Image (tube, helix red, strand yellow):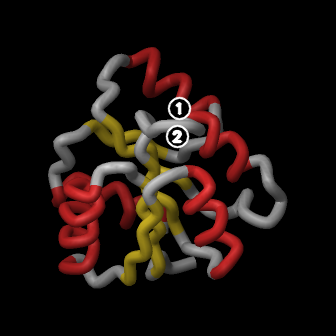
Amino acid sequence: MPIQHILIVDDSKTELYHLSQILGKGGYQVRTAENGPDAIRRLEESKPDLILMDVVMPGQNGFHLTRSITRDPRFADVPVILCTSKNQETDRVWGLRQGARDYIVKPVDGAELLAKIKALA
């Protein structure tokens, strides 16, 4: 299935803008959410083809949110790429165990992000 619609979940408006610019220039349609409840609301409004998920957020962090989404039968087929400043191998392994399909460390390299998305399509 081709990826066209991407939901970005990040509590930083700067990161949301930066990632939206990269993805928009890559030809993707982007929607954003600033926290867990906002992300769930967006998912229920319209199912994306991919979720780009921050880890460090107030309230429900990205690891927990990824686990909730990937174990929900309505959204289990939506791949999640964790996009975070947490750069330890243990964080990457834990994120993949929560159901993420890939992991990218901030600051995000646009070409690397676009390549990871294409690899999932």
Q: Which residue is mark 2?
A: 62
Q: Which residue is mark 1?
A: 95
Where is residue 29 drawn, in percent x and y?
38, 83
Label 1's element?
Answer: helix
Say if 49 sits above or below 8 in the image. Answer: below
Disc 1 crowd rating (10 Å Cα; few below 14, some 14-19, many 20+) is many
Name the outermost residue toward the right: 73
- Say which quarter of the image contains residue 96: top right
Is residue 118 visible in the rendered structure shown here? yes
Given residues 1 and 32, the one toward you in this image is: 32
State if disc 1 and disc 2 touch (CB < 8 Å): yes
- Kind of residue indicated by mark 2: Gly
Where is residue 70 drawn, in percent x and y?
70, 50
Say if 19 sits above or below 98 in the image. Answer: below
Is residue 105 left or right of 35 when viewed as pictured? Answer: left
Label 2's element?
Answer: helix
Q: Earlier in the sequence, mark 2 or mark 1?
A: 2
* Quadrant of image for the N terminus: bottom right
